Image (cartoon, rainbow, N blue to C red):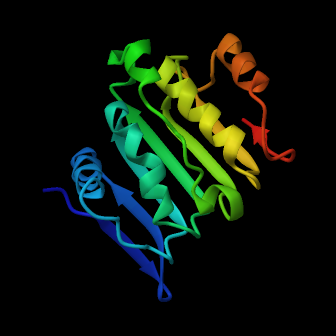
């Protein structure tokens, strides 16, 4: 089993990092019992498989004060559009409404359906999001992909997409 890593600064957990196996374990656990609340986690870096995106809102629910989320999606090119359509983001966690100000995608964004669905979820549901950062294969995002992202409606009028 993977381990969860917390970096503690002054009595607050400010950085929470997970690995692929941790996401699988948490997704499996969340189907049995609610995940424990992590009320002091304000920054999370997550490496996760696209197939585990279905449990992301459930996990975010346990981090009500999250203000920075950095994600590295793995195997995103392997998921077909039918599988992506089965991922449902029906809930909007409290952190998206009250505290999340930064989202960063560390893996290169190449326009695959799963990536775009996740970008859309954060832009359409994050009420106070200030910045969403994307990376492309050569450091910058392809112009066509960037234009598609810019067309996505944003819940936060002050959100910058970089």
- The answer to whether 34 is drawn above or below residue 80 in the figure is below
Q: In which quarter of the image is residue 45?
A: bottom left
Q: Could one spot residue 134 in this view of the protein? A: no
- In the picture, which quadrant includes the N terminus? bottom left
Position of 126 relative to 113 (above/below): below
The residue closer to the viewer here, 20 or 31, is 31
Residue drawn at (52%, 39%), measured in percent from left and top? 89
Residue 90 horizontal/vertical position (percent) = 54, 42
The mark total stands at 0
Q: Quadrant of residue 67?
A: bottom right
Q: At which x and y percent is residue 133?
A: 65, 39
Left or right: 10 in relation to 144: left
Q: Going by the picture, which residue comes out furthest to the left? A: 1
Q: Is residue 75 left or right of residue 91?
A: left
Residue 161 in the image: state x and y as whole percent. 74, 36
- The C terminus - image quarter: top right
Residue 142, image x and y in percent? Answer: 64, 15
Toward the right, the furthest residue is 157
Above or below, 2 against 10 in this view is: above
Q: Residue at x 27, y 44 (%)?
A: 20
Can I make out residue 5 in this image? yes
Against 89, residue 18 (above or below) is below
């Amino acid at each position: 089993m993977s381990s969860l890593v917390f970096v503690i600064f002054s009595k607050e957990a400010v950085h929470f990092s997970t690995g692929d196996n941790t996401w699988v374990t948490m997704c499996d656990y969340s189907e049995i019992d609610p995940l424990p609340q992590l009320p002091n986690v304000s920054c999370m870096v997550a490496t996760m498989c696209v197939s585990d995106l279905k449990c992301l809102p459930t996990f975010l629910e346990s981090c009500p004060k999250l203000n920075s989320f950095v994600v590295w999606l793995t195997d995103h090119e392997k998921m077909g559009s039918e599988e992506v359509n089965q991922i449902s983001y029906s809930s909007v966690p409290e952190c998206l409404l009250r505290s999340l100000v930064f989202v960063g995608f560390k893996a290169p964004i190449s326009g695959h359906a799963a990536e775009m669905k996740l970008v859309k979820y954060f832009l359409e549901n994050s009420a106070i999001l200030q910045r969403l950062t994307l990376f492309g294969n050569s450091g910058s995002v392809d112009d066509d992909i960037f234009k598609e992202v810019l067309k996505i409606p944003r819940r936060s009028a002050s959100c910058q997409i970089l």
